[in-house]
Image (tube, rainbow, N blue to C red):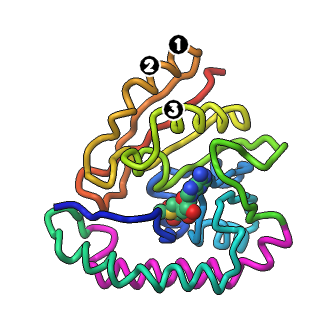
Amino acid sequence: MVVKLDNIVPFGRSLTEYQRMFQLSPDDMEREILDIAGGPASFNAEMAQLGHAVTSIDPIYEFSGQEIQKRFDACVDNIIEQVRNTPKDWVWSYHKSPEDLRRNREKSLALFLADYERGKAEHRYVAGALPDLPTERRYDLVLCSHFLFLYSEQLSYDFHQQAILKLLEYSHELRIFPLLTLGLERSPYLDDLRRGLDQQGYFSEITKVDYEIQRGGNEMLRIRLPA
Ligand SMILES: C[S@@+](CC[C@H](N)C(=O)[O-])C[C@H]1O[C@@H](n2cnc3c(N)ncnc32)[C@H](O)[C@@H]1O
């Protein structure tokens, strides 16, 4: 059995998880990064602490920190319980158990919330939703964690195509993780999307990364315009 989510959940990941999911090198960390669908990840907060430049865009930034905490509290028990009840679906290498996963998600949320008002004032957290982007700026690198492909059952092929092409208008490089759906299948959109991108002159490659929690979910897609 696989986990079912009624809505897209407000779970956020840490800087270390982003480094592993996206194979971020020291040079990558120096780049101007857009974290699309950043949600309550602590990636932006932790990067800001280190003096790095990240802008996060997500529709939940319309809400107050209190409201985001409330949404998290309303669903965390249920999700962790579903995870506990589906032991074959998960790999406990990075997170050590469902309880450890919960603690790590709570920690990321707390770091995010502590940074949220300041980050909003500094325009590091910007409300917006794909396939549109509320920005004029270009970025060196766009990261998309746990949104595109993961929600392939909820979001159409056309949505994915529009979103990816829009993101590539703003950066010459986009990395997406994971490539699995919530049903633990590789997204049915992946091959056709890659073929379309190839025809438009983009180079894409799938890379194995040192991060896995969904069983089999240790691959990242990297899309670039050849130099
Ligand atoms: C599972 S969370 C992932 C958060 C973060 N990227 C991470 O991995 O820690 C998915 C996020 O997608 C956001 N989202 C939902 N619809 C979106 C859209 N149309 N455009 C951008 N983000 C969206 C949700 O608000 C939520 O914060």
Task: Say left or right for 29 vs 222.
Answer: right
Q: CA distance from mark 2 to mark 1?
A: 6 Å
Q: Which range of residues does the magenta coloring cover?
A: 93-122
Residue at horizontal 23 percent and vertical 64 percent from the top: 91
Give the side of residue 201 with respect to residue 16, left or right.
right
| Residue 119 inside the magenta-drawn segment | yes
Task: Report the Cα–Cα distance between label 1 and label 3.
Answer: 17 Å
Residue behind mark 3? 158
- Disc 1 vs disc 3: which is toward the camera? 3
Predominant secondary structure, magenta span: helix
**Amino acid of disc 3:** Asp
Q: Where residue 104 sits: x, y (%)?
A: 43, 79
C-beta proximity under 8 Å, tags 2 and 1: yes
Rendered position, 127 above or below 162: below
Residue 26 seen anywhere in this rendered image of the structure: no
Whether 170 is drawn above or below 118: the answer is: above
Q: What amino acid does circle 1 point to?
A: Gln
